[in-house]
Amino acid sequence: MAAQEPSPPSSMENNKPGFPKKILANKLEDKHLCNCCQNILRRPFQAQCGHRFCSYCFNRTVGSGPQKCNACIKEDIFEEPTSILKPGCAFPDNAARREVENLPAVCFNEGCSWKGSIKDYELSHEGKCEFMILPCPLCKELIRLNEQERHNDRECPERTLNCKYCKEPFHFRNIKAHDEICPKYPMICEGCAKKKIPREKYVDHIKFCSKFRTPCRYHVVGCDMSVEKEKIHDHERACAHEHLNLLLHYIMGMKVSLEGLQPQSLELAGHKAHELHQELRDLEARVSQLSAIPGPTGPPVKGVPSSSSSASSSSAGASVGAALELQLHSKKTKVADLGRRCQELEVKAGTFEDVVCVLNREVEHFATTMEASNRQHRLDQDKIEALSNKLFLPLLYKNQYFTAKRRDARAEGGRLYN
């Protein structure tokens, strides 16, 4: 019968390398070290060549295929196939495991006084020491395990909090910014001193709060008084004379400003009109000059040399062409802009049509559902009426029967008495 190969270590035994050397209380011996990670053996495996490895280190080494044993090469005892590491060529070294697990151990974390065996360290202390220093996953600050909860709840600048007013999450560093925009943040009315007014309702509150102080309606003309809403009319009546004086000074100042600007404005307008008239006369002269210039095969203008006439014609034609090109470019730009707007409107119209179609389908579905519900309701009413008839008619008939019997009995008793 073929020899059965040892089963691979479990996943629990295969997820950690060796123990750190600092946990050993006594002198460290080389036979207790893994030939791969150079730490204290954890779940030791012994290869065919006699070297020991942690189960995690061995599986990681042979995971990509057979490998040469580095310890054999270092000790100059390499020989094939004994020194070739591959899956199935190693077995759990339980004797070495028991020896390692019984070694005395101490905790290397500063401030911790734990002592015991390596087995006790693995079962009850590794990864659970309150003095173990870990980086915060958010702010990366190094903190002890026993202070992690307090750090996460109170100290971490990157922690996430839930607003106690609106219940929305936010980062601690943004607490002031959130308080300034939180719609549920409690505000205090400056007029009536009412507290705990949500920010989203504060504007509506001050609109109707009679104690809220608002600027006087005449503040645009110089009144700097802020008056409670309920006393605004009393203020206007009491300060009517001052308000009229402020209005008078304001109007007089405006009149002076307009009088000072009027001549300058008229002069500027006249200058602009003169310039426009001059430009119009120049344009008319150019048009008349162009109309008098003959074509390329026509006779020259009387009294004007042919060379001068052709030069003038070419320059005028160039200027007119440039002006026409400029106007044409402007028109094309406007047409392109209008086309783009039309396309945007078409897209929006298509979107609205889709929305209307969806709404129509929803309305039809709702109408069908309502009709089916009404039909089912009528059927249920008919069933209820039928059940009522089945239940109450026999009782009614029985009641009528006993009533008739009692009436007959009373009549029979009256005849016997007579």
Image (spheres, grey):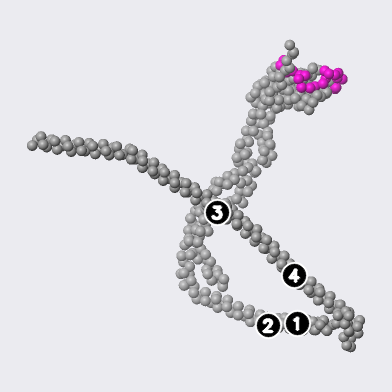
* Residue appearing at x 61%, y 43% in the figure: 160
Query: What is the distance, in whole Å, between disc 4 and disc 1 at their CAs?
Result: 21 Å
* Residue underneath mark 3: 360
Disc 1 and disc 2 in contact, CB within 8 angstroms: no
Q: Residues within 10 Å of mark 3 (few under 14, many from 20)?
A: few
Q: Nearer the viewer, mark 4 or mark 2?
A: 4
What amino acid is found at the position of numbered circle 2 in the picture? Leu
Q: Given the image, on which type of amino acid does mark 3 rest? A: Asn
What residue does disc 2 label?
A: 266
Q: State the image quarter where residue 149 is shown.
A: top right
Secondary structure beneath label 4? helix
Q: Earlier in the sequence, mark 1 or mark 3?
A: 1
Tag 3–tag 2 contact (CB < 8 Å): no
In the rendered image, is residue 106 in sight? no
The one of 14 and 207 positioned closer to us in this rendering = 14
Instruction: Determine the residue positioned at 47% across, 49% down.
Output: 370
Name the residue carrying label 1: 280
